[in-house]
Amino acid sequence: MTTETINESLDDAHNDDHHDHKMTGIKRWLYTTNHKDIGTLYLWFSFIMLLTGGALAMVIRAELFQPGLQIVEPDFFNQLTTVHGLIMVFGAIMPAFTGFANWMLPMMIGAPDMALPRMNNWSFWILPFAFAILLGSFFMESGAPNFGWTFYAPLSTTYSNGSTAFFVFAVHIMGISSIMGAINIVVTIMNLRAPGMTYMKMPLFVWTFFITAYLLIAVMPVLAGVVTMLLTDTYFGTSFFDAAGGGDPVMFQHIFWFFGHPEVYIMILPAFGIVSTIIPAFSRKKLFGYSSMVYATSSIALLSFIVWAHHMFTTGMPLFGELFFMYCTMLIAVPTGVKVFNWVATMWRGSLTFETPMLFSIAFVILFTIGGFSGLMLALTPVDFQYHDTYFVVAHFHYVLVTGSLFSIYAGAYFWLPKWTGHMYNESLAKWHFWCSLISVNLLFFPMHFLGLAGMPRRIPDYALQFADFNKWVSIGGFAFGLSQLIFLAVVIKCIKGGKKAPAKPWDGAEGLEWTVASPAPYHTFSTPPKID
Amino acid sequence: MTTKEYESYYVPAQSHWPIVGAVALFMIAFGAANYVTDFKNEVNGYGGYLLLGGIALVIYMLFGWFSNVINESMSGKYSHQMDNSFRQGMSWFIFSEVMFFAAFFGALLYVRSFSVPWLGGAGNNFETGAVLWPDFTASWPLLKTPGGTETTAMGWFGLPLINTVLLLTSSITAHFAHVALEQNKRPQLKAWLGLTIILGLAFLFFQVLEYSHGYSDEMQLYLTSGIYGNTFYMLTGFHGMHVTLGCIMLIVMFFRILKGHFTSDNHFAFQAASWYWHFVDVVWVILFVFVYIL
């Protein structure tokens, strides 16, 4: 199949009622049904949210630069940590992956667009409104949510500062957005694959998003359920999470983490997909163990439903529960180990080059594995009793979410920027972004392990003197990491404005249908499905 | 295009309905949040108006959006593949609804098997009962909470049983309506669908009647009556809301059939409404067993 044959048939079969395909100005973006436009919207939105959540983190790190209360009141500090977490999880990481899904899935499976394009637009445009409500609560009488991103009852019910209702309805909208987005992904993959592309011929990227979308459809409604109980407990006198009425605050944690643990994999499985696309491309080899990757991803997804209570070892569960959840959690290391092994085996004796996407991917493999190992430590019940709610936990989930998910997002962004913009990005500036991020992120998060092991609790604005030195370095790392992300913004803007013209396939080791269309990708691709042999 | 090997997939033009829907959802969420906050603080605000405005806007959006879709479908723009997309989309939406109910059923089973017995001192929680709630004995239905709120339980005989029969029957009549549509027997289709709607409305009527019994001075079963009242009203209430939505869908289908819509092999909307109806029926059966009987 050559590039020309596909480009010829690009627009013929398109069904739009109008002939000039793009509206101009704001209406193009508000009314769009095009998966590439919507992907772009998702990606920009998530980057804006990343900077917003990052700005909140800067204030947190400024406060923690030295012991004592300097900049913010403890209550406002709690609002900062809460909203930082919510924004990064629901506003930065998840929409970024949905953006990738929108841009790449139809092109990778040879589909003309997402299966339900109008709903696709709706799932994006409700998101900014949800975050407007969440961020708007900073300026309300009550203040923003201050009960942690996990919003444990009774902090969010009996002891709420009055922001619970705004929080609950904002989460409802985010949930609706995620469910609609996920349904669209599932239906697109099940129904719109090009003829001949069987499930086991799909790129692994497609597989990981497929499985992630199932997780979303299964657990986002549970989140909706638990915030609804929170709402009625706070405002309508029910007692789901109140022992005096026969309920149980620990039940909140069970339902929340039944959502929350699959949610963790919702934020990492797509990262696996991106890295599994990039490492083979720059190793100039096929992905090692494709089918074992598919099975490993599915096993991780299935296991994610039976490990939730490892977040709750210290709540006084029955011993059997502690053991069950400990062993199930440790079991997850097996399929994850398969993946890490396969990535390394893909690079083994490959003809490696180290462009920025590859650098971020290699950093992902190493640093995500560090985050995985600290997770394994936390999975051990007796050990977790010591680590619970310390900075060790903070270090763990930032290693998997920042050097894991976020690094994979950067890797994917650099990898596909030529396809999106039609220009090559500035490689040396991008390498500056990588090395600055890599050094500062480790300065930021690695000492947190020691702080946690030494007993520094998380979510406090002040701390004992012996933690001062490490916290100073952590804060310096934090500011440096935050500033480094502005380099990425510069790279992207430069790349959109111009630069070396990108060929249809700028990476010689890359495979997949998306490289058979021109760069930048035409507004409509694969109106007629390509034939896969 | 010279040869048409595959059906082409319809990609709609730009549409302004989603952004109208996004604004509507924002009004609903922000309005409702303001409303409940003001309600708790006992002040009057504009939240309620915003909420109602949002609901009106959503209804307007649904009318506009669906009439676009119906027009496209009637003018033959949709392929077989498109129909599949709709079907799969609807079934995964119903699955997400199942998981929403699962959260509440999970809560019910958790309080019944763990939190209520533990409050009464079961397992290794002897001291919880003895120290915190010495006067409390665990039982289900929980008629006296640890805090001392008393209530009575809703039996399964009578209205709930009648409602079970009504809803089960309506599921069968909905199926007959579908069969009639597939065999292109329009009069039977109208009759069976009409009967389904009547059964659904009767269910809702009896549900309201049952609530009024619950809220009577005699029974004193309120939403606030401890975890039994909480789970009872939340589960039956959310189910009732879904039945209401299902009824509205069926009524819309009825009017579309009167206008001559749907053919024996092209009737996704009818199929979706009928799936939804079977889904609320199944939820009710589970609910009847775990909330009323056991």
Image: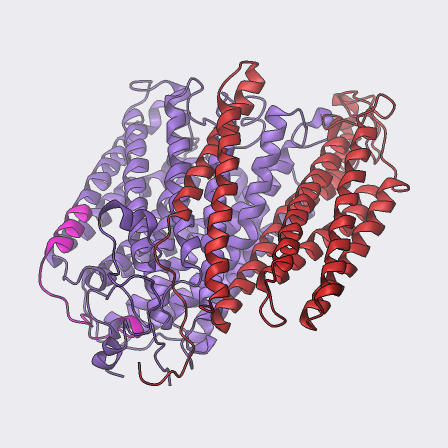
Q: Quadrant of the N terminus of chain B?
A: bottom left
Residue ID at (76%, 60%): B192
Residue ID at (77%, 54%): B195
Q: Answer whether residue A507 is magenta in the image.
A: yes
With respect to residue A422, does B233 lie above or below?
Answer: above
- Residue B279 lies, in percent from the top left, at 69, 55
Q: Answer whether residue A337 is magenta in the image.
A: no
Quarter of the image where one finds residue A463: top left
Of residues A244 and B121, which is closer to you in this image? A244
- The shade of chain A is purple
- Residue B96 lies, in percent from the top left, at 58, 52
**Residue range (magenta):** A487-514
Q: Examine the rendering and report whether any part of residue A294 can be seen.
A: yes
Q: Residue furthest top?
A: B43
Residue ID at (51%, 39%): A172
Q: Residue furthest right?
A: B157
Residue ID at (60%, 54%): A306
Query: Taking B86 as reference, is A315 left or right?
Result: right
With respect to residue A41, does A359 lie above or below?
Answer: below
Q: Quadrant of the C terminus of chain B?
A: top right
- Residue A508 lies, in percent from the top left, at 20, 75
Query: Taking B251 as reference, is A257 left or right?
Result: left
Q: Which chain is red?
A: B
Quarter of the image where one finds residue A141: top left
